[in-house]
Image: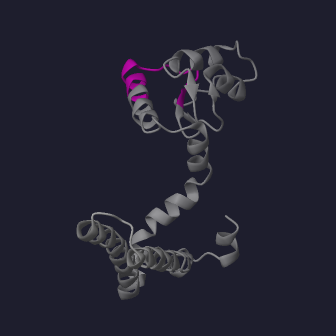
Amino acid sequence: MPRNLVPGFCIVQQAGQLHFQASMLFRDANSPAARLFMHHNADTPWLIPGQVMIVTDPNTPLTPSLLQCLQQTKRQINQRFIGFTPDEAGFLHRHYGTIAALTAAGDKIFSTTGDAGERYFSAIKSTLGKIETAYQTQYRAQGTLNNERFFAERRRLPEELKTMVNKPLLKSLSRQALDLSSRSIVHQ
């Protein structure tokens, strides 16, 4: 019975060699479909979560132009994972939905914050600037970073920054914008 399945992609769930990926997808690693899979993906001997592999049906004709398009798309997607460790890629893959929701809701979150959000991020930027200025001023004036007044300022400003960064403002705004319960965000 002909299946006539459309060629496409499979997203890697676990890091591993191509042979491992084939064993996850096919019951028989020596089947025509598994061999074709190994052939189409031979350029990626090791894969990490989120990368894609080409999957085709050996009973469905595949034109050279379609195969070329699949290979080009696969290369473009997989190149974005260069430099990621398997753990980093796994984290991104597991939390894709949350990351996508936050990214898509970004404009809504920050438009909802209005002046409050702008003041919040401006205050953080200002405090970072004050820390930098304190170091520069002390060093220019004294040629050293060994002064009691400087040490007091160096203790105060990072505490101020820590207080701002730990404010629940952003978390509550993103929860509100995404209409998620506080319990679901806290436990992620």
- Residue at (71, 16) in percent of width and height: 29
Residue 32 seen in the figure: yes
Q: In the rendered view, would you say 85 is above or below 150?
A: above
Q: Indicate the position of residue 71 as horizontal and vertical percent values.
A: 42, 26
Q: Which residue lies furthest to the bottom in this view?
A: 115
| Residue 58 visible in the shown view | no
* Residue 135 horizontal/vertical position (percent): 33, 68
Q: Does the magenta stretch include residue 54?
A: yes
Q: Quadrant of the N terminus?
A: top right
Magenta span includes 35: no
In the depicted view, which residue is nearer to us: 23 or 9? 23
The quadrant in which the C terminus is found is bottom right
96 lies above or below 68: below
Magenta stretch? Answer: 53-70
In the rendered structure, the answer to whether residue 136 lies left or right of residue 63 reads left
Residue positioned 39% across, 18% down in the render: 64
* Scheme of image coloration: one colour
Res 119 → quadrant: bottom left
Q: Which residue lies furthest to the right in this view?
A: 27
Of residues 32 and 114, the one nearer the viewer is 114
Q: Residue at x 28, y 66 (%)?
A: 139
Left or right: residue 164 versus residue 69 is right
Residue 11 x/y as whole percent: 58, 37
Identified at 52% across, 23% down, the residue is 44
Q: Write down the quadrant of residue 120 in the picture.
A: bottom left
Query: Is 171 displayed left or right of 15 in the figure?
Result: left
Above-or-below relation of 72 to 93: above
Q: Residue furthest left?
A: 140
What x and y, as percent, mark residue 75? 42, 30
